[in-house]
Amino acid sequence: MPPKLSQPPDPNSPLYLRLRDRINFALHVATALCVCSGILFLNKIWNAGWSWIPLLLLVWTALVLAHGFWVFWWVKYEEV
């Protein structure tokens, strides 16, 4: 049985905003994992020796960590 909403979603609600930000963070993590693992896989299969991969992984990891910091610690959703 799927969950049912007790009221229509309000885009200005703090609960809605918190859920939206956490879903965006989850998509960011999933995208980073898919792209980076795909690049590592292709590098291994093709034996390409791409030297830019560690820099990409480092930068994207830093962005994901900054996004997580923003979503889970920095942003305060005010209850109305």
Image (cartoon, rainbow, N blue to C red):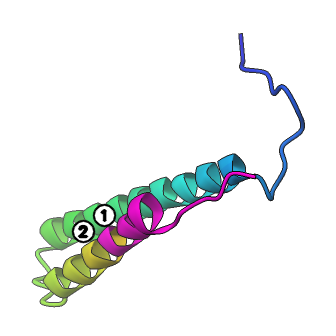
Amino acid under disc 2: Leu
- Residue 42's disc number: 2
- Residue 74: x and y in percent read 43, 69
Q: In the rendered view, does 54 fall on the left or right side of 24?
A: left
Task: Locate residue 5: give its quadrant.
Answer: top right
- The magenta stretch is 65-80
Q: Looking at the image, can residue 35 be seen?
A: no
- Residue 56's disc number: none
Count of numbered labels shown in the rendering: 2
Q: Which residue is mark 1?
A: 38
Q: In the rendered view, does 38 fall on the left or right side of 21?
A: left
- Residue 62: x and y in percent read 27, 77
Amino acid under disc 1: Gly
Other residues around mark 1 within 10 Å, as few (<14) / some (14–19) / many (≥20): few
Task: Locate residue 70: give its quadrant.
Answer: bottom left
- Residue 34: x and y in percent read 37, 59
- Residue 50: x and y in percent read 15, 86
Query: Residue 61, relative to residue 33: is it above or below?
Result: below
User: Do the numbered discs 2 and 1 sit on residues whose CB atoms are within 8 Å?
Assistant: yes
Residue sitting at 81 percent across and 56 percent down? 11
Q: In the rendered view, does 1 fall on the left or right side of 45?
A: right
Q: Looking at the image, can residue 46 be seen?
A: yes
Residue that lies at the very extreme toward the top in this rendered image:
1
Query: Residue 77, relative to residue 63: is it above or below?
Result: above
Residue that lies at the very extreme toward the right in this rendered image:
8
Q: CA distance from mark 2 to mark 1?
A: 6 Å
Q: In the rendered view, does 78 fall on the left or right side of 23?
A: right
Helix, strand or loop under label 1: helix
Other residues around mark 2 within 10 Å, as few (<14) / some (14–19) / many (≥20): few
Helix, strand or loop under label 2: helix
Q: Quadrant of the N terminus?
A: top right
Query: Residue 80, relative to residue 50: is it above or below?
Result: above
